[in-house]
Amino acid sequence: MIRTAWLVLKKDLTVEVRSLEIAYTTLFFAVSCILFFAFALVKEGKAPEDGAAGILWIAIAFGGTLALGRTFERERQSETLRALLMAPAARPAIYVGKLLGIVALLAAAEVVLVPLVAFLFQAPLLSHPFWLAAVLLSGTIGFAAVGTLFSAMLVRARSRDVLLPVLLYPITVPVIIAGVRATAALLQPDVELALVRFWVALLIALDVVFVTLALWTFEPLMTD
Amino acid sequence: MRVLVLLVLLVSSPAIAQQPAPDQSQQPKQTDEFVPISQLPAQDQLPAAPLLVTAYAFVWVVLFAYVVSVGRRLTKVQHEVERLESDIAKRT
Amino acid sequence: MPKWFVPLAAATALMFAASPFLIANAPYEATMGLVQKIFYYHLPSAWVFLLSAIVCGIASARFLFGGSPRQDRLAYAAAELTVLFGAIVLVTGPLWARKAWGVWWQWDVRLTSSLMGWMVAWAYLLVRKYGGPGSDKLAAGLALFGMANVPFVYISVNYWRTIHPATSVVPTLPVDMGVALWFAVACFLLLFVLLLRLRVYLEEQRARLDALYLSLDE
């Protein structure tokens, strides 16, 4: 089962590395998001309080939605998803492989986005790198867990571009809130690590719930 | 049927409008001076009755509108079913 | 109209007609006064909102894993009622809050998670309407995630510092307030059963129509 997941992940990474199409477009879109918010919210050269945390997570969410849509659109066009589902592979393993691919893509984008936000908003985002990485990783996994499930389900649906945000955003509100609160706590001049630990624990709990639900429902949802 | 529901709603609404006078003996502490309402902070000066009436009115209206909506959809589907069944009966 | 509809509707309507009298006779709350009486409809509709989300989730799970179209019809009906009763909660609450807290809305856990649950129910309806083929399963998957939110909404107010009253308010109600409240709860539960059965009946008629169209094509 782990081998299947690994194979799916390797396939996705190989395909992506060839053209880097999704990586570049997602990154550019996320950067544009951040700049847009910077132009809209910055007053007299200063960003609002907690602005950096919120803007970072919005960029991750919007960029992530785009990446999810593009990844599964690619699968739909070459009908590879149907081929994958017909292969004698455990369905949950396919889900895990695709999830890891999306998380890797978003993590690569975050490597660029975090310094950019820190630079544009003079936010000390890199002062506690271990905790920031924990927050970003658990939040991204939570977001991607729900996103991968819904995008895979939507591959054969009508109006799939519009329906993905409609399905995804309400469910991932707790993840985004926890991610923003945790990041904002890390940006305070005197960081309360207990508070950050609390939010990270909540994020991990959400990840467990979402991944479990997704693994449980992936099979019946992908079957005709 | 809908007329019955409407009548019941109409009859019950005056009951909400009549409120019994507040019981003076249950005041938490004895009033030793009178304070005109205009001296209270702005939040306490808000009259509560419009908010209360709006809330209850909203509940009634929304529930009523929903029942009407379902009823309307139901009659539409039922007419369609009758039309189709008569068509099928005519053919056989 | 099915046979059970008129008696059930009459019983519900009579109980609702009686409820304002009970509410008017309930004592005033010390700090909030008249506006607190919104509570007698706000709380039961909140409970029905959460109950409806749970019914939708369970029916969706049974539909996903069992394939029964009856469960799918039940889930669709329950989702619509979740939106309906959620709207009631989300309007009566702020009307009360405007006087009690001084603001229409606060982003505390209870309000935010309720709003989120309500939006999930809306998303369910949008998917069913515009999703095309396969949207019944899609929506069922969504409903499961929505149901996972329900316990969180309920307990959130006990574990976080929020402006919304905690759940301990209900067990500690004085008797005369309790009578009005539990009567209103009974009203709303009866109403929920009535509307749910009515809405499922509509879905059944629609299914009958689809079957007729299909038989016409043959």
Image (spheres, rainbow, N blue to C red):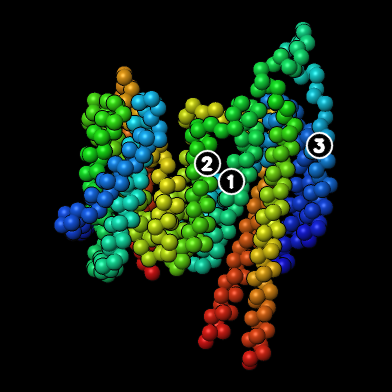
Amino acid identity at mark 1: Gly
Q: Name, please, the residue furthest toward the bottom.
A: B92
What residue is shown at x 50% (from left), y 45% (from top)? C117
Tell me the CA gap for discs 2 and 3. 30 Å
Whether residue A9 appears in this view of the structure is no
Residue B17: mark: 3
Q: Are marks 2 and 1 in contact (CB under 8 Å)?
A: yes
What residue is shown at x 34% (from left), y 59% (from top)? A152
Sequence-wise first label, 2 or 1: 1
Which residue is the site of mark 2?
C114
Amino acid identity at mark 2: Ser
Instruction: Read off the chain for label 1.
Output: C
* x and y, in percent, of residue A177 in the image: 40, 36
Amino acid identity at mark 3: Ala
Which residue is the site of mark 1?
C86
Say what secondary structure mark 2 lies in: helix
What residue is shown at x 76% (from left), y 14% (from top)? B36
Q: Do pointers 1 and 3 mark residues of a single chain? A: no
Within 10 Å of the Cα at label 1, are there few (<14), some (14-19), or many (20+) other Cα atoms? Answer: many
Q: Is residue C56 left or right of residue C183?
A: left
